[in-house]
Structures are given as structure tokens and as C-alpha cells.
Amino acid sequence: MAANDAARTIYFSTGTQLWSVSYDAPRTPTLIASFSGAVTSISGGLAWVPGENLLYATTTSSLYTVDPTTAVTTLVRAFGAGDFGGLDYNADDG
């Protein structure tokens, strides 16, 4: 789950789909799209990057960017074996 405070929107993944929901009522989830591009399933965390207007996402072994309007994924870096589960972005120092 990732929050875009400026747009008052929360993004979340069902694994194969990217969804959004507003901070404000009625808080109805909206399907953005199924993930496509470099990977079609996100198994780890999501983080909003405000200066770039994109999401970072993880699988168990790689880091991706996600277009928040299309759910298209792009590989940033593969880390190999391991478990890359959580993710957070610090806007103060990147």
C-alpha cells in the first residue's frame, strides 16, 4: 500500500492488479489496471515517489517502477535470490 498525500489517494495491489481509493468519502476502490510490462504480479511492497509521480514496487527479488495511471511496470534492478518484502520511500532524502 502506498499513499499520494497531494492527490489524497491510496494505491494498493491485489498481486496482479493496481487499485486506488480516495482519502475522502465515499472511499470506493477503483481498478486502475492489471500489471503489465516487465512483471505482471507484485508480491511485495508499494511506495509512492512524489517528485516523480510514480510508484516503486517489489517482488521477492526485484525492484520496479509502476505507472500509477496504467499499471505498466519497468524493472529498476534485480537483486537475485532473497526476499524483498517491504518498501518505503523517504521524500526528504530519496
Image: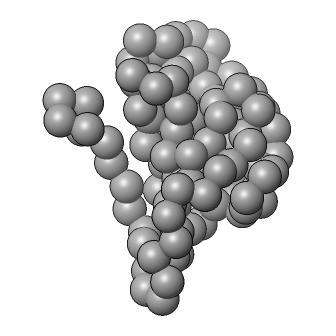
Residue 40: image x %, image y %? 77, 60
Give me the residue at 57% from left, 11% from top: 25
Residue 5: image x %, image y %? 39, 18
20 horizontally vs 5: left or right: right
> Is 67 drawn above or below residue 21 in the view shown?
below
Residue 68: image x %, image y %? 64, 31
Note whether residue 23 is visible: no
Q: Residue furthest left?
A: 92
Give me the residue at 52% from left, 56% from top: 76
Q: Quadrant of residue 15?
A: bottom right
Rendered-image quadrant of the C terminus: top left
Give me the residue at 68% from left, 49% from top: 73
> Is 50 drawn above or below residue 18 in the view shown?
above
* 38 and 89: which is toward the camera: 38
* 1 and 74: which is toward the camera: 74
Residue 39: image x %, image y %? 73, 61
